[in-house]
Image (cartoon, rainbow, N blue to C red):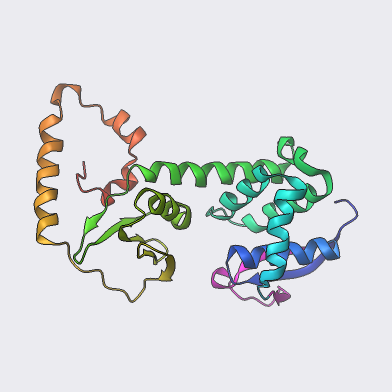
């Protein structure tokens, strides 16, 4: 990438994965790198930046998506997706350099951990994937009526979609809502298809009477099986971090 041109521009996009892959397509085609990349929602305007808004092009996005798997590796596509879900500042620039270099040198890009942006991408992927994996065992669904189940989460990273895919596979015939309260997003699944929507103005109904009774039984069971003399708060927080307790029915 030494012969690439650094341009004095800040790219803005809609914040979606398709939007970001559109930027990757344009940058690789023109052999140029912008100074910064921001999602439109996170950008604060100033007089120093020369901004260009990049419209999402699904054809370009599809070509990059397929190209990553074909020309680099499926592992690279996997790393890219989970790194993109990270809450790391300036994640787009790290991933852009990782992918553009990957298209030039192939799958060995994933072994070049001494390169700063490759190392950064691997760390971002590790954190997002790890949090998603942890929440698969900590999400608590509650019945809110009409055979609809609801779960709230407060994740550091934007992992609502892969987390939703996990529960769609586990509960394919169940209607449910997963609510990311940090980002005001809801994943809605009706037993057939899912959709992620803004939840700013959505009011979640209270839990059903039957759910209240089941929760009381669960709390009683949780309390009964606990052995006071063997309580280990440090070990408990290692496997069930305290920041997630607010979403647990048994709330330690």
58 on left or right of 227: right
Residue at 32%, 35% (x, y): give it: 237
Residue 211 drawn above or below residue 29: above
Residue at 73%, 75% (x, y): give it: 50
Question: In the rendered image, which quarter contains the C terminus?
Answer: top left
x and y, in percent, of residue 70 in the image: 74, 49
Residue at 65%, 58% (x, y): give it: 92
The front one of 14 and 136 is: 136
Given the current orientation, which residue lies at the most extreme top position? 229
x and y, in percent, of residue 97 in the image: 74, 52
x and y, in percent, of residue 148 in the image: 25, 63
Q: Quadrant of residue 7?
A: bottom right
240 on left or right of 142: right
Q: Does 65 lie within the magenta span?
A: no
Residue at 79%, 63% (x, y): give it: 27
210 on left or right of 182: left
Residue span colored magenta? 32-54
Given the current orientation, which residue lies at the most extreme right position? 3
Looking at the image, how many numbered discs can be counted on the residues?
A: 0
x and y, in percent, of residue 115 in the image: 74, 40
Whether residue 109 is visible: yes
Whether residue 36 is visible: no
The front one of 56 and 39 is: 56
Residue 35 drawn above or below residue 112: below
Q: Does 48 lie within the magenta span?
A: yes
230 on left or right of 135: left
The front one of 103 and 9 is: 103
């Amino acid at each position: 990438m030494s012969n690439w041109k650094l341009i004095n521009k800040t790219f803005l996009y809609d914040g979606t994965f398709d939007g970001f892959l559109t930027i990757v397509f344009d940058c690789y085609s023109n052999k140029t790198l912008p100074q910064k990349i921001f999602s439109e929602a996170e950008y604060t305007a100033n007089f120093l930046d020369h901004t260009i808004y990049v419209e999402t092009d699904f054809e370009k996005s599809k070509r990059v998506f397929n190209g990553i798997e074909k020309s680099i590796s499926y592992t690279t596509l996997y790393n890219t997706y989970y790194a993109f879900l990270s809450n790391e500042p300036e994640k787009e620039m790290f991933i852009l350099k990782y992918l553009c270099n990957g298209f030039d040198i192939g799958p060995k890009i994933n072994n070049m951990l001494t390169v700063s942006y490759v190392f950064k991408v691997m760390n971002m992927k590790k954190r997002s994937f790890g949090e998603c994996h942890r929440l698969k065992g900590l999400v608590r669904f509650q019945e809110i009526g009409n055979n609809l189940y609801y779960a709230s989460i407060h994740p550091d990273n934007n992992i609502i979609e892969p987390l939703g895919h996990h529960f769609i596979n586990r509960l394919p015939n169940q209607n449910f809502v997963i609510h990311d309260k940090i980002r005001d997003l809801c994943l809605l699944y009706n037993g057939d298809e899912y959709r992620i929507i803004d939840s700013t103005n959505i009011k979640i109904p209270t839990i059903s009477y039957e759910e209240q009774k089941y929760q009381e039984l669960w709390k009683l069971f949780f309390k009964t099986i606990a052995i006071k003399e063997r309580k280990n708060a440090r070990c408990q927080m290692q496997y069930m971090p305290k920041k997630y307790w607010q979403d647990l029915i048994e709330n330690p």
